[in-house]
Image (cartoon, grey):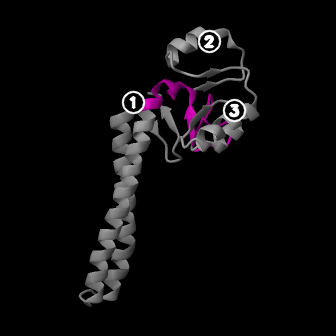
Amino acid sequence: AMLSGDHDRGRERFQRLFGPAAQLHFNQSPLDKLAFIQRRQEAGRTVVMVGDGLNDAGALRQSDVGIAVVENISAFSPASDVIMAAEMVPRLGQVARFAKASVRVVRASFVLSALYNLVGLAIAAQGLLAPVVCAVLMPLSSVTVVVFACGATTWIGRRVLGPSRVEPSGVVTPSRL
């Protein structure tokens, strides 16, 4: 569905873009957008909202995933789960695949951490290592998990997004090479 505060001058173009089954709603106020999302959620739907202005802030916040589209990443943007450079909107499908893959990395990091700690606990309980060695290995486990998560996320980002940059803040922007 598309919700817009603008007039319906481009209705035909958007209908071709979104397909014949798409719901197109024009002249929508911020409250209309918010109510539409709430109705979808009450019907058991998961809602992803892509918005580009302050008039979308309530709907972005209410949605299950809010994606704020901005021209300048450093400028103010409404509260949302994702802040995306406007140039990336055509690549929204790739960004969604990247996000799904990133969730798998987080889960794998938890598994890695749990395994590391189980092995460490078993060794420590048997008294096979000196306390000073354990004191060194404990922070090393954290570093290992962080390096794994950062490395895997960067690799996935390059594989899925191609020549894009995934910043530590989670912002996805095209590379400026």
Looking at the image, tell me whether mark 3 or mark 1 is earlier in sequence order: 3
Q: Position of residue 46 (x, y in %)?
A: 53, 41
Quadrant containing the N terminus is top right
Q: Amino acid at mark 3?
A: Lys
Secondary structure at numbered mark 1: loop
Residue 107, compared with residue 38, is above or below; it is below
Across and down, in percent, residue 160 comes to: 36, 35
Q: Residue 56 or 1: which is nearer the viewer?
A: 1
Q: In the rendered structure, which segment of residues is drawn in magenta? A: 65-93
| Spatial CA span between label 1 and label 2 | 33 Å
Callout 3: few (<14), some (14-19), or many (20+) C-alpha neighbours within 10 Å? many
Q: Residue furthest front?
A: 43
Is residue 81 in the magenta section?
yes
Report the disc number at residue 33.
Answer: 3
Q: Please tell me whether mark 3 or mark 1 is closer to you in this view.
A: 3
Using the numbered discs, state the Cα–Cα distance from disc 3 to disc 1 in whole angstroms: 34 Å
Residue 98 marker: none
Q: Is residue 138 above or below residue 93?
A: below
Horizontal and vertical percent for residue 79? Answer: 66, 44
Is residue 28 one of those drawn in magenta?
Answer: no
Q: Residues within 10 Å of mark 2 (few under 14, many from 20)?
A: few
Query: Where is residue 125, by image quadrant?
Result: bottom left
Residue named by callout 2? 11
Residue 119 lies, with reference to residue 75, above or below; the image says below
Residue position marked by numbered label 1 in the rendering: 163
The quadrant the C terminus occupies is top left
- Which residue is found at the position 36% from the left and 51% from the top? 104
Q: Earlier in the sequence, mark 3 or mark 2?
A: 2
